[in-house]
Amino acid sequence: MKRVVVLTGAGISAESGISTFRDSGGLWEQYRIEDVASPEGWIRDPRLVTDFYNQRRKQLLEVSPNYGHKGLVELEKYFDVHIITQNVDNLHERAGSKNIIHLHGELTKVRSERFDNLVYELTPDKYEVKIGDKCERGYQLRPHIVWFGEAVPMLGEAIKLTETADIFVVIGTSLNVYPAASLVHYVPEGKPIYIIDPNSIAINNNNWHYIKKVASEGVKELMKIITSTTQ
């Protein structure tokens, strides 16, 4: 069975109603990124950061996976599908995908601000975190998110996975966010790369195929293209 490795970004979740920090009028517009998505912001005002991520979790509870997510689950009937996502939401999991690497952390988890290995899963009925909520070693719980300026601990695993791809797919990301964007350079030579995005992206390689559609429509077209080659 051929392996399909999919890199997803904010565009796939935007269709479900999750605002990105580029959206006008969205949750991010009320905050400066450096205040809520950096280690310095956490040190400066942990209460503000904690409240921001509580709001994001509440928003996540109000949305559902779209066909961009669900179509990747259907693709598992034909391929060995693995997802590398830049998104911190759990919409891939809720759609039913089994193999997921979260490059930038997970919104539904928190961890000790001192011990990175002490990670805790939040539940829908207990999604709020407060200042004073601590790990078993007595340190405040912080979002399990890779903030700007922090290392990306799952990057090595993502690179190894990309190197095994028979087909590589990019959905809903401009390939401007590094280091995630660098993954395309680890796709084995000669293997096809499909880019699903409604916006223009520079393509300078004959193995790159552009599907200029939103995620849900683009995944439908992708399925028609790549499943026809398995018949």
Image (tube, helix red, strand yellow):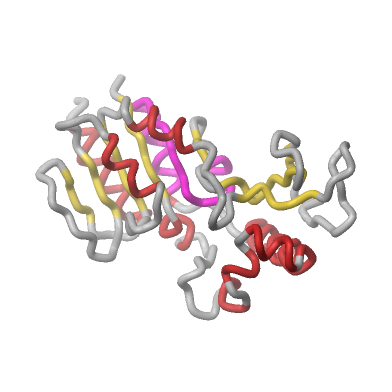
State the image coordinates of residue 148 (x, y, percent, origin top left).
54, 57
Image-based side of 71 in relation to 112, left or right: left
Residue farthest along the top direction in this orientation: 1
Residues rendered magenta in the picture: 69-95
Tell me the residue at 61%/60% (across/down).
38
Q: Quadrant of the C terminus?
A: top left
Viewer-side residue, 177 vs 2: 177
Tell me the residue at 73%/61% (across/down).
43
Q: In which quarter of the image is the N terminus?
A: top left
State the image coordinates of residue 106 (x, y, percent, origin top left).
61, 46
User: Relative to 79, does residue 213 appear above or below in the rendering?
Assistant: below
Q: Is residue 133 magenta?
A: no
Tell me the residue at 24%/33% (across/down).
227
State the image coordinates of residue 203 (x, y, percent, origin top left).
17, 54
User: Relative to 57, does residue 209 appear above or below in the rendering?
Assistant: above
Q: How many labels does the image show?
A: 0
Q: In which quarter of the image is residue 138?
A: top right
